[in-house]
Image (tube, rainbow, N blue to C red):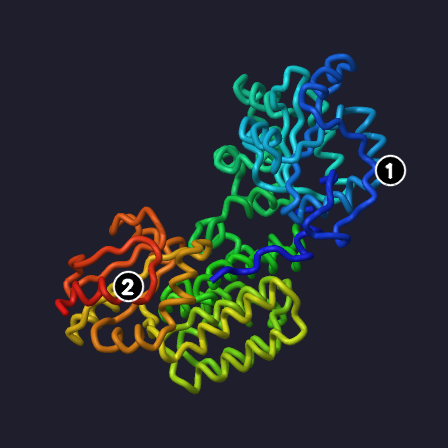
Amino acid sequence: MKKIILTLGVLLSMLCMVKAQSMYGDKVKADVKMKYVYSFEEALKKARELNKPVFVNWFADWAIPCHGMNQYVFSNEEFAQWMDKHFVNLFIDITSTEGNSWAVKYDAFMMAQYAVLNTDGDLIFRIVGGSPLPGFQKLLELSLNPKTTLPGMDKRYENGERSLEFLRNYADVLKTAGLHERKRQIIDELFTKVKNKDLSKKENWDYFIQKINDDDDELFQYLLVNKAEFVKNIGKNSVNQFIAGVYAMKLFPYICGSTAYDSKKMTDIAMGLHKGDLPDTLGVFALYDIAKFRGEKKYNKMLDVMRKGIQGYRQDFVMNLDITLGDLKGLNNHDRDILIDYLKERSIGLQEPALSYYEQAIRELENRDGIQFVDMNFDDALAKAKKEDKMLFLDCYTTWCAPCKTMNEQVFPLKIVGDYFKKHFIALKIDMEKGEGPVLQKRLGVDAFPTMFVLDGDGKVLLKLLGARGAEAFLKELKEVAGE
């Protein structure tokens, strides 16, 4: 099911000039002060004449962060004058044919994104993601100093510069450019030079938290043991928020149901939260309860927590969480009803597109006649099929696949299909991009969506179906493999 991923809140954290009427209408109009040229060739010619670098605003109308930058940054008169003084400002609409070709050349598709080029058109600085002023201007100031451009920092590193200050600055430039793998390598090198007694110092905090991957990380455990020292140098709120964030990421797969519930791992998380000595007011405790009650199928208790809200989390996150309830399988009628009532309650007053996502989740829960997919992992579903002397039907899908949605909305809910499945199949749906999906995708050789399998109880593939089809053709193929 499609999840809501863009909201107004993104504008403030990720924060481009539109030449034509926007698909978003008046809501994103802004009084942009920037003086742009709209031809790549013209920009380079002007850059050579004025001996200025070229600032490139890669723009896509569909990208809300681009519009946010228009409203919060490019409408600032003082900033626009500063930009005109130091750069030739080029606007490229990457959705146009010509703009797309330039975007391909410079690999500029993650929005919002900005580049600085020298007079030969070579990339010397990249900013992936927007930011408010004055931070955005400070980033661009780095591109004006040959020593702090991307090539400049690379050259200094190649020449053997390794001071702690340089490594920190180099990591920052790489992070700004979205070069995360290289950034991780530099941060790893940085921490070979930082002594344990200096780990909690303020100047190392941003790099310390970027180096930590999860709660099992050695540095994270060091943080928990030495929390008081970190709080003294960094501040209680920042340290608590980071610890809570690490556990929130650990909980997320259980919260949205993309990973099978594991009571042992949940116990480990509970112990970690206790060890972290976090205040009860942090939203991570609500997330823990939601994950626990969802995994234990105590839906009334789960909904009680969700109704109370999750402190510190944006509305788009909460809406995403609501919508995943439509993915729950193997529900009894009582649980279906309380989940449907909750989603209807939450959808009151919503506008499109959010409303349509809630309506789709409700339709999936209301499907009592069609295929009843089980809520378990692949191995357990296979064991269940063998025990009941049935075949396993496996639907390999993704949330963005249109033919997958066709099957899900027009074929799987039909009573004639559901009745046949009750007699012959244990049915399982797995998102190939979540949980065990990527492993199964490789194991079963799935390279198109949807791909549907019929397997016997020992895991032998009896039938492989590619793409969507109507109910009649679908059932005909299943009956053939069943020998009917």
Which three-letter amino acid code belongs to the residue tagged 2? Phe
CA distance for labels 1 and 2: 61 Å
Q: Quadrant of residue 311?
A: bottom right
Q: Position of residue 46 (x, y in %)?
A: 75, 17
Asked if residue 60 lies left or right of residue 88, the reply is left
Identity of the residue furthest to the front in this view: 472
Q: Quadrant of residue 343?
A: bottom right
Residue 231 position (above or below residue 386)? above
Viewer can see residue 268: no
Identity of the residue furthest to the left in this view: 483
Task: Name which residue lies at 32% across and 61% down.
Answer: 395
Closer-to-camera residue (420/449): 420
Asked if residue 181 lies left or right of residue 90, the reply is left
**Secondary structure of residue under mark 2:** helix
Residue 474 - label: 2
Residue 77 - label: 1
Residue 483 position (above or below residue 33)? below
Closer-to-camera residue (138/103): 103
Task: Name which residue lies at 52% across and 60% down.
Answer: 3
Q: Position of residue 354 (x, y in %)?
A: 60, 65
Which three-letter amino acid code belongs to the residue tagged 1? Glu
**Secondary structure of residue under mark 1:** helix
Asked if residue 35 lies left or right of residue 59, the reply is right
Q: Residues within 10 Å of mark 1 (few under 14, many from 20)?
A: some
Closer-to-camera residue (131/344): 344
Asked if residue 18 lies left or right of residue 123, the reply is right
Residue 200 - label: none
Q: Residues within 10 Å of mark 2 (few under 14, many from 20)?
A: some
Q: Position of residue 476 (x, y in %)?
A: 23, 65
Q: Quadrant of residue 329?
A: bottom left
